[in-house]
Amino acid sequence: MDQPPPGTSPPDGPTDGPTGGPGQGVDLRIEGCTALVHGLGGDEGPGGIGFAEGVDLEVVGGLIARVGPPADRSGAVPGEVVDGRGLLAVPGLVNCHTHAAMVLFRGAAEDVDVHTWFNERIWPMESNLTERDVELGALLACAEMLLGGTTTFADHYFHMDAVARAVEVSGARADLGWAAFSTDGEAGRERGLDFALRRRGGAGGRITTSLAPHAPYTVTEPDLAAFAALAREHELPVHLHAAETAEQTRASVARTGATPMQVLDRAGLLDVPLLVAHGTGIVEPDLPLLARAAERGLVGVASSPRFYLKAAHGTTPVRALRGAGVPVGLATDGAASNGDLDLWASLEVTSLVQKSLGGEGDPTWMTSRQVLHHATTQSAQALHLADAGSARGAVGRLAPGHRADVALVDLSAPHLQPVHDLAATLVHATRPGDVRHVVVDGRVVVRDRRLLTVDVPAVLEELRPRLAALTRRDAGRVQTYQP
């Protein structure tokens, strides 16, 4: 391929990890790649993004130990070598909110309003799902994400032990929460807590867990407060849907006298680590509450812009949230609403929507580097996975001490050439099929576009005979959507 234009060097020169020196006991070395690096300042602030050319990434014990020039290699022979010449290394993408097993309903609830989508399509079909169905769907979803360079996802669903098994098998990284509704009673909270405590730290540390009350419109305020108390007691984050639409915000004010964000604040959920999915209904009075939580590193928002365009939901107010200091991570939601789990498309749509449809009308806003900052650093912050010193570990950067989650993009395809601006090429031209290799926790899980961990044909062979029963809508529903 043509070499990308010269980039910049890492901000502080070659970097050694805590292992004592470059090349010592190296498990994996990615040699001679161009790497997306942070810490260069610019319009993204201290986390600004640039590109370092001709560097190695060395991995020890699942962590990045060194990002630097080949000249700094020691004489040690690494356990495994990946040839990175002509490839662009980016942090493994982070999908901040999805429902992995909902790939089972891809295309089964199209072109309808949100009430019909929930009440007449999705919730009746979900009542058919067995634990094995969820496991097969999650395996298929993990395969789709890994092949496209998404290495971490936050999942909010049910039968979550099945999803955990899929994560273990596939080699992905995930934050998992078992969804609960007030109609489940106390048993729903206990089930979600039991799952979170049993499974956190699983899959060699690749599984982290959260509590997962569904949303303020399906979980009462006393129950939300009970989840907040459990989160404080057990040091668990909370992952929920809130202010998904402007309609939900108006309905909440009419029903409770408060916006969904104000309800969360009254319940104590803005005092614990919290991931808010969607937030297109966030309004001006919510911003001071969110800003106070963000100052303490407690709150992040996950934005799934392609889903909002399909459902005519508006968009997450990213610029206002940025002004309040709230990290906004990128997401796909489930494939039943989004169509797929393509996070590259979410990058591009975020830029386009925020420039044109977010009330901005500003082509200079949401630059390619800003979008990449949301997809890497801010996505990790939103998932509370940005602190390299925490038990949860850190993702979202190619830097020493961070987990070795890497996607290597082949820029040789005609639709990616010529390259004048690597950031713009990543955001506006790159597709999942351009990812050649993927590493998670220092382990190669995709090599030469072939997934090494999941037998996708076998998954599909078992799944196909089950689809007719899964999509029946005559067995009732698990909930009724009333915002």
Image (cartoon, rainbow, N blue to C red):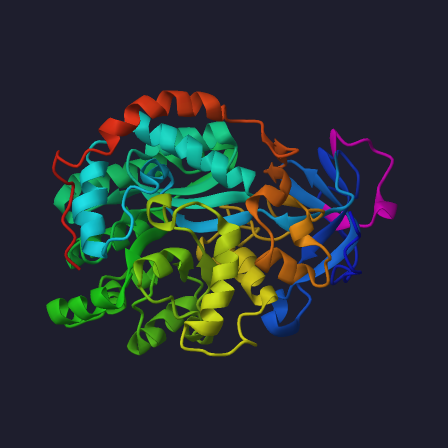
If the image is split into quadrants, where does the C terminus sit?
bottom left
Q: Residue at x 78, y 37 (%)?
A: 24
Residue 74 sits inside the magenta stretch: yes
Give percent across and percent down for residue 382.
Answer: 45, 57
Q: Can the viewer see residue 197?
A: yes
Quarter of the figure with residue 251: bottom left
Viewer-closest of 379 and 121: 121
Q: Is residue 422 toward the left or the right of residue 95 in the image? A: right
Vertical side of 290 occupied by 334: above or below: above
Q: Which residue is drawn at 75% across and 56% down?
A: 52
Q: Quadrant of residue 377?
A: bottom right
Q: Where is residue 214 in the image (x, y as percent from the top left)?
A: 25, 50
Task: Report the front residue among 387 and 218.
Answer: 218
Q: Where is residue 246 in the image (x, y as percent from the top left)?
A: 26, 68
Is residue 374 placed above or below 176 in the rendered structure? below
Q: Nearer the viewer, residue 95 or 307?
A: 307
Q: What's the magenta region?
A: 66-81
Q: In this view, does 23 lie to the left or right of 375?
A: right
Magenta run includes residue 458: no
Q: For residue 335, what is the image quadrant?
A: top left
Residue visible at 13% across and 33% down in the picture = 475
The one of 313 and 325 positioned closer to us in this rendering: 313
267 over 436 or under it: above or below: below
User: Residue 305, how many percent across, how many down?
Assistant: 41, 60
